[in-house]
């Protein structure tokens, strides 16, 4: 599938090309869209990427940022790749689940052990193979990966062991792996728009939600849910998404620059997000949140049989778990 893209000549006029090639004397401008705001770590990652691409290309290749959801929701920004109004989308890998169930591997519970394991998986051979498989099946090319850090629970109920999850109504994203994770742990997973979570907690429609700690602060879940349960059940992976045909239409030099600068920017973001975690906990505690660190062995044991329910993910689960 060939996507149109923006091409700016030296005189400053924009010429729409069809994706077959780029004139040698042209300045290429790619629009990067995300729902992240410029103030967040990942908004800063997008800016660092844009700056690095401009510098490495001598200004011949530029990334124009469209942050804060200015081109729509995550789903809408991805759909815009198909018509060429966005050239790059920064989001988590699992956002591609609607295009290929393989993308749900990012949301598989207790798969990534820590930051070192994340790096070995996503920035090594496994990550390359995974991104190639997704490009082949979905037509979308993932470039680079940064660790968003672990997802945790905000809960109105104290959770000291896996048994305390029995019947807990927890909001989950609309991804089968998330629903099966919490059902397997004994909770009652409840799909719900993120915009409805705060009022859902207040009204008692749900008892809990799971997200990175940064989202707990941004959405003020601490006002409606007293406890933060450190479940560490998923390490989120941010990435840059291109239409693969669009990406392959760029020159070898341009693709190399984009890949190298994505790696640099995401490594920076991973370190910054890791350093931010301690501050986030202190801030939440200052806002009245009570942290609980349950024994996670029981969580992992209950979820051990889950791979059999996702045969398309099982080979990847086995390979990632074996990675050192």
Image (spheres, rainbow, N blue to C red):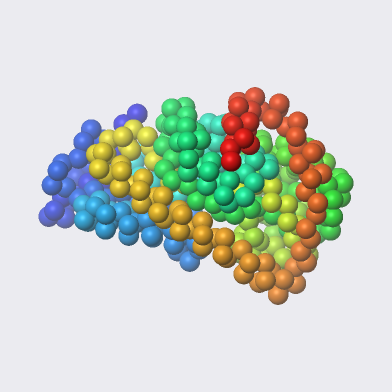
Q: Is residue 30 left or right of residue 221?
A: left
Observer-nearest residue: 130 or 182? 130
Report if residue 68 is visible in the image: no
Observer-nearest residue: 236 or 8? 236
Query: Picture coordinates of residue 94 (x, y %)?
Result: 56, 41
> In the current view of this chain or complex, which residue is farthest to the front?
324
Observer-nearest residue: 97 or 201? 97
Query: Picture coordinates of residue 120 (x, y %)?
Result: 53, 43
Quarter location, residue 189: top right
Instruction: State which quarter of the image contains the N terminus.
Output: top left
Q: Is residue 204 left or right of residue 7?
A: right
Q: How many marks?
A: 0
Instruction: State which quarter of the image contains the C terminus.
Output: top right
Query: Picture coordinates of residue 99 (x, y %)?
Result: 51, 33
**Residue 321 drawn above or below residue 46:** above
Residue drawn at (41%, 55%), measured in percent from left and top? Answer: 265
Query: Picture coordinates of residue 38 (x, y %)?
Result: 45, 64
Residue drawn at (45%, 53%), measured in percent from left and top? Answer: 266
Q: Is residue 95 left or right of residue 240?
A: right
Q: Is residue 317 left or right of residue 225?
A: left
Report if residue 311 is visible in the image: yes
**Residue 250 drawn above or below residue 310:** below
Residue drawn at (30%, 47%), measured in percent from left and top? Answer: 257
Residue drawn at (24%, 39%), measured in percent from left and top? Answer: 251
**Residue 302 drawn above or below residue 48:** above
């Amino acid at each position: 599938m060939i996507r149109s893209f923006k091409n700016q000549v030296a005189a400053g006029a924009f010429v729409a090309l069809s994706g077959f090639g780029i004139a040698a004397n042209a300045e290429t401008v790619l629009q990067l869209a995300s729902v992240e705001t410029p103030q967040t770590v990942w908004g800063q990652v997008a800016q660092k990427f844009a700056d690095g691409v401009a510098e490495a290309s001598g200004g011949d290749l530029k990334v124009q940022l469209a942050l804060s959801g200015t081109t729509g929701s995550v789903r809408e920004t991805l759909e815009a790749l198909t018509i060429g109004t966005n050239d790059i989308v920064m989001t988590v890998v699992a956002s591609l689940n609607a295009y290929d169930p393989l993308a749900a591997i990012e949301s598989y519970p207790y798969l990534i052990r820590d930051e070192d394991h994340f790096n070995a998986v996503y920035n090594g051979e496994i990550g390359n193979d995974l991104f190639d498989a997704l490009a082949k099946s979905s037509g979308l090319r993932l470039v680079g990966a940064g660790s968003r850090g672990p997802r945790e629970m905000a809960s109105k109920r104290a959770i000291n062991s896996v048994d305390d999850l029995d019947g807990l109504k927890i909001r989950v994203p609309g991804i089968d792996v998330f629903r099966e994770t919490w059902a397997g742990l004994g909770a009652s997973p409840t799909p719900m728009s993120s915009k409805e979570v705060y009022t859902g907690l207040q009204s008692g429609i749900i008892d809990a939600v799971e997200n990175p700690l940064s989202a707990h602060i941004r959405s003020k879940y601490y006002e409606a849910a007293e406890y933060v349960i450190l479940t560490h059940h998923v390490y989120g992976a941010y990435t840059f998404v291109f239409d693969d045909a669009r990406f392959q239409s760029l020159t070898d030099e341009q693709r190399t620059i984009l890949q190298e600068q994505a790696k640099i920017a995401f490594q920076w973001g991973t370190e910054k997000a890791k350093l931010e975690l301690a501050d986030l906990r202190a801030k939440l505690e200052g806002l009245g949140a009570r942290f609980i660190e349950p024994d996670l062995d029981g969580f992992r044991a209950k979820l051990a049989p889950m791979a059999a329910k996702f045969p398309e993910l099982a080979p990847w689960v086995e390979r990632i778990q074996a990675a050192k």
